[in-house]
Image (cartoon, rainbow, N blue to C red):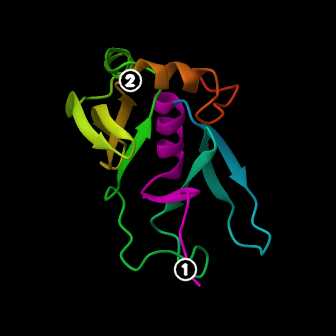
């Protein structure tokens, strides 16, 4: 049998403070928080949903019996790239309006589908957050119409 993966479903981000991180991802990136009860009596999990994806916020203090995870978990060690339907200038204005420091960009980067224009900032733990858009305006327009994934109805633009 030959195995080929076709998509990424979710990521787990280790955080020092779930409440502070959830508030930041909701406020700065427009994600929707969902607290999901565990079926096996373990502590609930905090999911941050956007488009058809989610990230789970795992408290760094969680024990592996409660939340099975990587061998070397550490808050602030992630490097994540999120696609936005906003222009780089709109991203810069939004981050500044939220009091979020820009650590690099806007500038070109290589993405999975071609050249991105990226703006970088850091989440509350110091993980590197890249907010990017493809330079081809048609991709942005198609995403806004829902053709490249379904944006959540409650998601607010940057």
Q: Which stretch appears magenta?
A: 1-29
Point 38% across, 29% down: residue:
134
Gap in angstroms between the C-alphas marked 1 and 2? 34 Å
The crowd level at tag 2 (other Cα within 10 Å; few <14, some 14-19, many 20+) is few
Q: Secondary structure at mark 1?
A: loop
Q: Are marks 1 and 2 in contact (CB under 8 Å)?
A: no
Residue hosting label 1:
2
The residue lying at 21 percent from left, 29 percent from top is 105
Residue that numbered label 2 is attached to: 136
> Considering only vertical position in the picture, is 81 above or below 142?
below
Q: Is residue 2 left or right of residue 35?
A: left
Q: Residue at x 33, y 21 (%)?
A: 88
Q: Along the horizontal axis of the image, is 90 left or right of 152?
A: left
- The correct choice, above or below, for 125 with respect to 61 in the image is above
Instruction: Please say whether residue 158 is visible from this viewpoint.
Output: no
Q: Position of residue 35 (x, y in %)?
A: 69, 50
Left or right for 38, reference 57: right
Q: Quadrant of the N terminus?
A: bottom right
Residue at x-position 64% and y-position 27%: 146
């Amino acid at each position: 049998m030959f195995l080929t993966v076709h998509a990424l479903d979710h990521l787990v981000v280790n955080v020092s403070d779930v409440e502070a991180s959830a508030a930041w991802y909701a406020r700065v990136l427009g994600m929707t928080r969902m607290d999901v009860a565990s079926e096996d009596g373990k502590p609930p999990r905090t999911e941050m949903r956007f488009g058809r994806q989610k990230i789970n916020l795992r408290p760094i203090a969680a024990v592996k019996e409660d939340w099975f995870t990587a061998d070397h978990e550490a808050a602030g060690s992630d490097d994540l790239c999120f696609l936005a339907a906003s222009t780089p200038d709109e991203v810069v204005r939004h981050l500044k309006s939220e009091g979020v420091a820009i650590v690099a960009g806007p500038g070109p980067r290589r993405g999975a589908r071609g050249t991105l224009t990226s703006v970088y900032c850091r989440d509350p733990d110091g993980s590197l957050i890249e907010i990017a858009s493809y330079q081809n305006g048609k991709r942005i327009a198609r995403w806004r119409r829902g053709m490249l994934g379904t944006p959540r109805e409650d998601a607010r633009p940057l």
